[in-house]
Image (cartoon, rainbow, N blue to C red):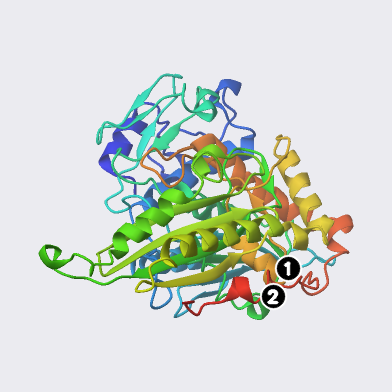
Amino acid sequence: MLDDNVLRREDRRANSTGRPEDRGPYPKEAAAPSDGFTSKLARELASDLLERFCRYVRIDTQSRRDRSGSPSTPGQMVLGRMLVEELLAAGLEDVQLDENGYVTATLRRNVDSPAPVIGVLAHLDTTPDAPGGGVQPIVHRGYDGGVIELPNGETVLDPRQMPELQEKRGHDIVTASGDTLLGADDKAGVAEVMAAVAYLASHPELPRPTLRVAFTPDEEIGAGASLLDLDGFGAYCAYTLDGSERGELQDETFSALEAVVTVQGVDVHPGQATGKLVNALRLASRIVSLLPVDTLTPETTSDREGFIHVYELNGTPAKATFRAILRDFDDDALRRHLALLEMTAHQVTDPEPRARLAIEIREQYQNMRRHLERVPNVLAAAEAAIRAEGIEPVRRPIRGGTDGSRLSEMGLPTPNVFTGGHEYHSVREWTSVQDMAAAAATIVHLAEAWTRPEYAATGEGRARAAAPAALSPAENRSNPRS
């Protein structure tokens, strides 16, 4: 159920006759075109979708870096158990929550013609980059195009700073209260998958192949696909619901490395430190300060430009550590970013023989384009589904990654589809109900597309392709270097 705050906001436009299926602001009959919905189907899905979304975001599922097990936090299991109950109630089969936090389920085919098994996925966790507990979703009905002032943290959504928000006049905008994440990344995707498969299950007249559903833990820390049993999942291909702007279809991501740089110093009482102290925190800070500022940072790059992003620095004079992520669409450029980081670290620490330097590099994911270009039918079916919803597909690379990056590398081609969320990883996060509904409707269309001969005839087993080699043994090392 929605909380009182959300219900009060909704009641102003509710069309309630007292029957549960009629409650909410989105009657099944056609509404004025100005309501922002892309189709009658999207409008029909909206109320169920919104109720699910507001329920899911209240569960704190922030993942934690340096996890000791899967999932990294208990809240992900709480949401997983809720989804299991809802999947069973919707009539899906083979519903499971395994010990690692992966939820899987099956919606059986209802067509006689050959059709491959298709997967749809979203991730359970939210980012550890901003506060994620105590989320209170707020629905702003019929957005008027102005500044949205949130009740906490003096947080505002200003359309002058957010071009995407300018385009949502008339939409119903969902935010948090201003001091936490909303969790649209990726609970918008979770709600869209749930609403779509529940709708398909209750409408047997709509053609569909066998659909395999998966909700994965710990995507935000780069581990979402690592323990998914692909043979058990058994899909020919899959789609993650983890994009942003309406119409996005993404087949290209960054390739990604994480670097953990540790400097060991010599700690001495500052009053007796002359000629003895080697301040590790100062050395680590100097490494960071010598990295490029006007280039190779997230705030100075765009489009296909990569970066080195230092996102955490802590320590003492005895030991200091900073973490950085390295990103680029081109593997050769990514190697150059890594070489620059390593050279800078040695440049600072090598002149001090008493300091010790360790650099741990972990490959997080690869650009999924190299895998998806081998199976063009997977993208063609998605484009057909988006167009069936009355939207022109927008093909653009992701300046980030998704579970699809790793899944495609593992042999399950998995492009990424929009969800309608924006301003991810911040307290300004927001989403449009109309765009979320369009994403859910796209899943329904996608199911139909895969029953067509031009797509169904292509799918035997899993759409495996020979995976290219990893970046190199050096880039995949996990042992500290001195």
The secondary element bearing badge 2 is classed as loop
Where residue 419 appears, as percent x and y from the top left, is 56, 45
Asked if disc 1 and disc 2 are in contact, CB closer than 8 Å, the reply is yes
Where residue 466 appears, as percent x and y from the top left, is 80, 73
Indicate the quadrant where residue 438 lies: top right
Front-lying residue, 34 or 355: 355
Front-lying residue, 55 or 221: 221
Residue 52 visible somewhere in the drawing = no
Looking at the image, which residue is at 49% across and 46% down? 49
Residue pointed to by mark 1 = 117
Looking at the image, which residue is at 63% across and 48% down? 398
Front-lying residue, 111 or 196: 196
- 206 to 294, vertically: above or below: below
Where residue 288 appears, as percent x and y from the top left, is 42, 53
Residue pointed to by mark 2 = 234
- 344 to 461, vertically: above or below: above
Tell me the crowding category of disc 2: few under 14, some 14 to 19, or many 20 or more residues within 10 angstroms, Cα based: some
Instruction: Identify the mark at residue 282; answer none if there is no mark.
Output: none
The amino acid on which the numbered mark 2 sits, given as a three-letter code, is Gly
Judge left or right: residue 342 versus residue 209. left
